[in-house]
Amino acid sequence: MRSIKRIAITTGGGDAPGLNAVIRSIVLSAHNRGWECVGIRDGYNGLLKPQDFPQGGLMPLDLSVVRGITHLGGTILGTTNKGNPLRFPVQNERGEWVEVDVCQDVADAIHAQEIDALIAIGGDGSMEIAHALCRKGVQVVGVPKTIDNDLVGTVITFGFDTAVSFATECLDRLHATAEAHRRIMVVEVMGRYAGWIALNAGVSATADAILIPEIPYDIGKVAAKVEERAARGGAFSIIMVAEGAKPIGGSATILEKTVGHAERLGGVGHKVGAELAQLTGKDTRVVVLGHLLRGGTPTSFDRLLSLRFGAAAARALESGQDGVMVALDPPVVRYVPLDQATRRTKTVPLDCDTILTARDLGISFGD
């Protein structure tokens, strides 16, 4: 077991409700063990590009800094999805932007700062980076964060419950205006290549159709569902669409793909809305919830899960754990190897109870 005196925290990728709660939990747990704690600003950019931060690339974290932040959205450390050390954007001698692996530079900077261990908070990309740093001699513990809930090894990630709760509330509100105007209301939500948010919020808010990446859709069958409702007196329809949804034989709709940046999905909601308007002749509106799902106050479930994860990460370091991710396995928090947590994306199983429930309720998946 290595002796720990100084640890670092990093938050990478998209932000999620509960990040500040995790940071506070780690800092308090570290303080109670006599450890110094620092935060790396904007993912790993605080180490790779410290000149970009007038206040310094590392942020000292003591009890006064984390006081009163449990309920706050965002992250006091900042975050980015444009500085992945495994695919860091640099210009070559011809002025072209290319991606290079700078994980060794990150590991060297961590050691130069006399940091004994790292707690990496993030999604699948952040866990992949953490695994790479572990292989380069950095003691690392990962904490799973993503509103998409697409990390294997943990039953749920913090941020997901808040995103689903907000999306459900939005659909509740849209029911009223859709019914008043006899419209089709298409609602697009985040989730990347997993349909967890769309599925859970769509079923909870009684959507009429839910389109998710795991089940390619036939827009004709979605239109048939709308016409079926109209024939039974349903003058409006609510269609929930995950940003990674794709038609049968088609692919996900990509907004942007550039060197060094995570692929941006989006636009499928407008595509579905336009096609339904043409097929049914009904007045159609599209609402993209987008980053609204990321912001705001975390639910009590996400706050508690974040605090549990942060404390569990500190316990893992104290016991000499390395190259692991904390994970919820109710009723306990356990540890799974990072290589298992990064092996694949956790998508929605087609035989899961929520999909079976949706089908029993008459909700269409466009298949």
Image: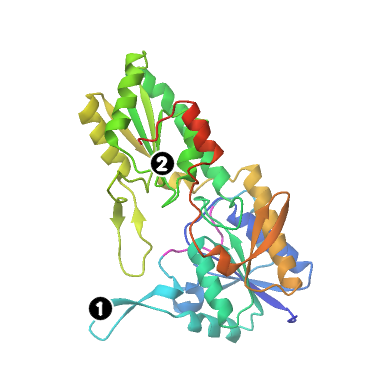
Q: Quadrant of the N terminus?
A: bottom right
- Residue 178 lies, with reference to residue 57, above or below; the image says above
Secondary structure state at the residue bearing disc 1: loop
- Mark 1–mark 2 CB contact (< 8 Å): no
Q: Which is nearer the N-term, disc 1 or disc 2?
A: 1
Residue 96's label in the rendered image is 1
Residue drawn at (33%, 20%) of the image: 228
The colour scheme used to paint the residues is rainbow
Specify whether residue 340 is painted magenta: no
Say the numbered circle drawn on residue 289: 2
Q: Distance between the residues labelled 1 and 2?
A: 35 Å
In the image, is residue 138 above or below residue 72? below
Count of marks overlaid on the render: 2
Residue 195 can be seen, yes or no:
yes
Residue situated in front as seen by the camera: 58 or 105: 105
In the picture shown, does residue 300 fall above or below 345? above
285 relative position to 163: left or right? left
Quadrant of residue 286 within the rendered picture? top left
* SS of the residue under disc 2: loop
Q: Which residue appears farthest toward the top when viewing the image?
A: 233
Q: What stretch is highlighted in magenta?
A: 74-81
* 144 lies above or below 278: below
In the figure, is residue 236 to the left or right of 298? left
**x, y percent for residue 47:** 51, 77
Q: Can residue 57 be seen in this view?
A: no
Tag 1: amino acid: Glu
The residue under the point 26% across, 86% down is 93
Is 76 inside the magenta-drawn segment? yes
Q: Quadrant of the C terminus?
A: top left
